[in-house]
Image: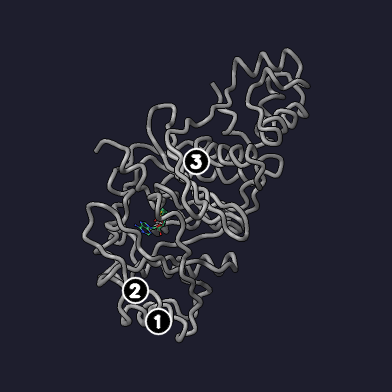
Amino acid sequence: MLNFFNYTLKDLQDLLIENGFKKFNAQQVFDWVYKKFETNFNKMSNLSKSLITWLNENMHISCLSEEIKLVSKDGTTKFLFKLEDGNKIETVLMNFDYGNSICVTTQVGCNMGCKFCASGQLKKIRNLEAAEIVMQVYHLNKYLHEKGEDLIRNIVVMGIGEPLDNYENLSKFLNIVRDDHGIGIGSRKITVSTCGLVNRFDDWIRDFPQVGLAISLHAPNNEIRSKIMPINNAYNINDIISNVNKYIKATNRRITFEYILIDGINDSDACAHELAELVKGILCYINLIPWNPVDNTTFKRSHNVRRFYEVLRKHGITATVRQEKGSDINSSCGQLRAKNEKK
Ligand code: SAH
């Protein structure tokens, strides 16, 4: 069976034409699914009987099954979904003053092994298919639509998994959600976060120069970074900086460096000075992230967030402190799944 959510409008047009239907039929189906949130082909009243029969026999519009939904005091809503093969993934809906944002998962588990992260405690089981990433957006849009609220305007690819380790499905997902005839979220409203798989940067620059890119830096030097992020042994800070320079030269876009602050590990004033020196002159900003406590780690939250921020500002570095959302519902970084998965 073909999964509807793996198709852009163009791809669906090609498929329908190949099977003897008309190009405009694809737009009809798209309108039912994406504008009217109808997922039953039999109810698509303007389609011919033969098209409905063909669709029922060849394609399915599958939906994610909601296992848990937690609503935080600040409105952040966290979903634990069960996939068709029984694996579970998390998706988060956040409301900012600039609109609703979704944080999507790209893999079941993660192999990057970052020491401070809950997702890495459960190894990667498999990549998500493009459709499974699209379905997270669709499911939340349907939820918002039913509540009479505004649909999703921004996507951050910062859920469980390393997106650049699932490049093909990530690309397909990005092409589907950017399609104006479907979900229609523009490149500039999407940010993909990577732990720094710079081997994919040439592809990224070629394919998605307008999509936002964030890099999880989390340390001002290789010594600290290698201690908390094993991936630094494959692609270190020097590799990251040279690839970032290449990225900026090619796209002229500002890059985001994410920097989690962990007590006594990477949050000293000296680290802030070193970080400022490292990124000086690079078109970037630094997103400081208060670390969210994760079970089975010895890390503690930093008390130096404000000072760290001030040091960067004094060096003339643009920085922001990430607004925390949904901390009362285990909203961060794979925690819900980790707690609901047998280890
Ligand atoms: N694999 C990608 C995207 C997923 S994680 C990446 O590494 O960027 C998204 C962001 O959340 C990353 O910056 C990650 O380092 C950070 N993160 C992971 N665990 C966290 C925690 N416990 N508290 C705060 N941020 C965390």
Please count the marks in the image. 3
Identify the amino acid type marked 1: Glu
Amino acid at the residue labelled 3: Asn
* Label 2 neighbour load within 10 Å: few <14, some 14-19, many 20+: many
Q: Which of marks 1 and 3 is nearer the N terminus?
A: 3
Question: Is residue 211 left or right of 122 when viewed as pictured?
Answer: right
User: Disc 3 vs disc 2: which is toward the camera?
Assistant: 2
Quadrant showing the N terminus = top right
- The C terminus appears in which quarter of the rendering? top left
Kindly indicate whether the residue at mark 1 contacts the one at mark 2 (C-beta within 8 angstroms).
yes
Give the residue at x 61% y 37%.
142
Q: Which residue in the rendered view is the most extreme toward the front?
A: 73
Q: Which of disc 2 and disc 3 is earlier in sequence?
A: 3
Instruction: Name the one closer to the observer, 222 or 145.
Output: 145
Expressed as whole percent of the image width and height from the top left, the position of residue 327 reads: 40, 55
**Callout 3 crowding tier (Cα within 10 Å): few <14, some 14–19, many ≥20:** many
Secondary structure beneath label 3: helix
Query: To which residue does mark 2 refer?
Result: 220
* Relative to 51, 229 lies left or right: left
Q: Name the residue under label 3.
A: 169
Provide the residue designation for mark 1.
277
